[in-house]
Image: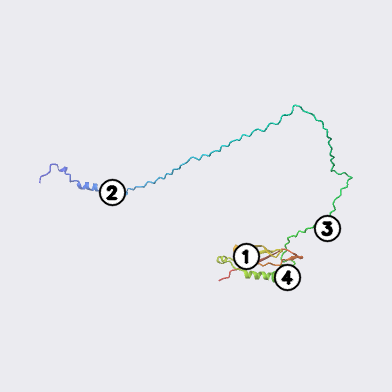
Amino acid sequence: MRLKKYPKADLNRNSGLYFVIGLALVLFLTWRALEYKTFKKAAVERRIVEISEAPKEEIPIIEAFKIPPPPTPPAAPAIIQIVEDVKEIEETLIQSTESSQEAIIEKPIIRVEEIEVIEEEEDLEVLFALIENVPVYPGCDKNITNEAQKECFQEKVMDHIRKNFTYPEVAIDLGIQGRVYVQFVIDAQGNITNIATRGPHPYLEKEAYRIISKLPLMTPGKQRGRAVKVPYNMPITFKLEDG
């Protein structure tokens, strides 16, 4: 085999090194291409506000009417004639309204019978424990003494509460119980008025108010033979049974 003239000029001597370098460069460019990220540009929203000119108001034309000047008064006569007064003027006498010390003034006599005396009735209020005749509950009119009337009144009121008593369902679900103090007034006509309640919860107070408002019309209490207002207080106990 014949030797080459320039053995160092062999081009295939470093071909493997060049291949490795080229491969590494291609891999590096491929990796950077894969890692390259692009971001979408946010769209810019543009709003255009059109401002139109305000409509011009038309000013109405007001015509001024020409008013003619008032007529000139007649001129005074050049010659003034003096006329003598022939008629006699009768003088009118004006009487004085003032009275002298000697004058007698008569006053009208007012009789006592003509004066009307109007008596205003006072709105009296007497406690239930101190009143002479307590209010009479329907069905208690057979009792004679005042003490018997009080006992019958209290019994009838308690029976009324037992018959009309309904425990509020909301209060049962919430476990609400307690004592409600009730105050009401039996007026001079026997009506139940001015009902006031005070208790642990509005649900119980509302039920107590409903029961008392259903009390019937009564015979009003009397003090010295006159019908008066009688306040009455009593408690109503709301209690849940265990179990």
Camera-nearest label, 1 or 4: 1
Give me the residue at 82% from left, 56% from top: 114
Camera-nearest label, 2 or 3: 3
Give the mark nearest the N terminus, 2 or 3.
2
Q: Where is residue 71 in the image (x, y as percent from the top left)?
A: 68, 32
| Residue that label 3 marks | 113
| Residue that label 2 marks | 30
| Residue that label 4 marks | 147
How crowded pointer 1 is (Cα within 10 Å; few <14, some 14-19, many 20+) is rated as: some
Which of the 4 image quarters holds residue 220? bottom right
Left or right, residue 88 beside residue 175: right
Camera-nearest label, 3 or 4: 3
Left or right, residue 31 beside residue 202: left
Question: Outermost residue, left direction?
Answer: 1
The residues tagged by marks 3 and 1 sit, at their Cα atoms, a distance apart of 53 Å
Give me the residue at 26% from left, 47% from top: 26
Give me the residue at 62% from left, 67% from top: 237
The residues tagged by marks 2 and 3 sit, at their Cα atoms, a distance apart of 133 Å
- Type of amino acid at the residue the image marks with label 2: Thr
How crowded pointer 3 is (Cα within 10 Å; few <14, some 14-19, many 20+) is rated as: few
Camera-nearest label, 3 or 1: 3
Q: Quadrant of the C terminus?
A: bottom right
| Residue that label 1 marks | 210
From the viewer's side, name the closer residue of 224 and 28.
Answer: 224
Give the mark nearest the N terminus, 3 or 4.
3
- Type of amino acid at the residue the image marks with label 1: Arg
Left or right, residue 234 beside residue 79: left
Up-down: is 6 above or below 172? above
Which secondary structure lies at badge 1? helix
Question: Outermost residue, bottom direction?
Answer: 142
Camera-nearest label, 4 or 2: 4
Up-down: is 88 above or below 15? above
